[in-house]
Amino acid sequence: MLSNKPSFPPYLRLGASLYVPGHRSQLVEIADGRKYPQLHSVIFCTEDSVQAQELPQVLDNLAAMLRQTIPHPPLLRFIRVRSPEILDRCLLLPHISKINGFVLPKVTLQNLDSYLQQFQRHDPFWVMPTLETQECFDSSEMRLLRQKMLSPLYRERILSLRIGGNDLLNYLGMRRERSWTIYETSLGQTISMLVNTFRPYGFNLTGPVCDFISAPQLLERETQLDLVHGLFGKGAIHPQQIALIEGQYRVSQEDFEAAKAILSPNRAAVFQMHGAMCEPATHARWAEQIVARASLYGILTEPSAASAPA
């Protein structure tokens, strides 16, 4: 169904996904990769960043962008739809095949079919369901959702799961503080539960958006903790956040050397490198992702505490 997949997990191409409200100008320049050449993925939004009365204009803007944009830019392009009804309208837009996929908001066991049954078997689109409803605090509900997502026709279409941190904090009556990462709030436990529920079954999860544009150290630290918790990819709400996020996706020289050694056909069953035990039987998956991250985001010239598994 989805052709031309790279040899590494395709979600590693997401990097910092820039959210762009659909009523903004310069959609074509952004979609073509001309406005932000460093961008790996963009999400054009029809949901929370758009008022209901603006939807007709937003859909017209997206239609105009699709007519003018090039077919295969260097970045991945997604539309965050507002509802299953808006997904249906987007799928009918001319040139919609220029989009790589859709972000599905507020996905639950009850509405997943309403979204995913709209796709035909041959459709080339990925989807990224967003976990951001009250059900996300219920581990049994999340296990049921996972089982539905694992059905073959659904699983092959899901590129990644996204975590809607602000929506989840809203259920707790909270807003994150400027000095604390999302993992230092009570939501940290919920994120860990979601990772432990979905990641062992092959689903990647992306890190929640960081609201504070003027707190670069907080964003860098939170992105490091995303990696430590097993998440990869992060929403960016401002172009300034792109380099800060993706700088944390570079790998250390030590990790890169260890990963290459672990993947070597002449490797020993267990060996020591850089003061750590390397065991290919249990570290091969980590090593593959480290090598892929290095090819996409580069290698640090000096060892960094930010190095962590993807």
Image (cartoon, rainbow, N blue to C red):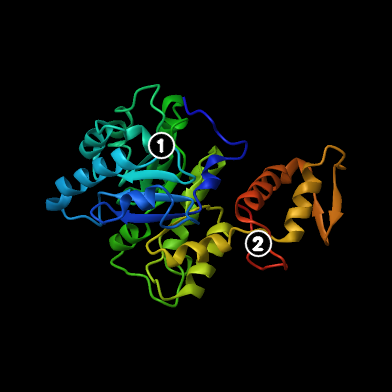
List x then y, in percent, for residue 197. Answer: 49, 45
Q: Which residue is mark 2?
A: 307
Do we see residue 198 in this rendering? yes
Residue beneath the point at 41% across and 63% down: 239
Q: Which residue is mark 1?
A: 71
Residue most extreme to the bottom: 179
158 relative position to 67: left or right: right
Residue beneath the point at 74% across and 60% down: 253
How many marks the image carries: the answer is 2
Q: Residue 153's mark?
A: none
Q: Amino acid at mark 1?
A: Pro
* Residue 302 occupies quadrant: bottom right
* Residue 141 occupies quadrant: top left
Do we see residue 136 in this rendering? no
Q: Amino acid at mark 2?
A: Ser
Label whose residue precedes the other's in the sequence (2 or 1): 1
List x then y, in percent, for residue 158. Answer: 44, 36
Q: Nearer the viewer, residue 47 or 268?
A: 47
33 relative position to 50: left or right: right
- Callout 2: helix, strand or loop? loop
94 relative to 197, above or below: above
Residue most extreme to the top: 121
Residue beneath the point at 36% across and 55% down: 19
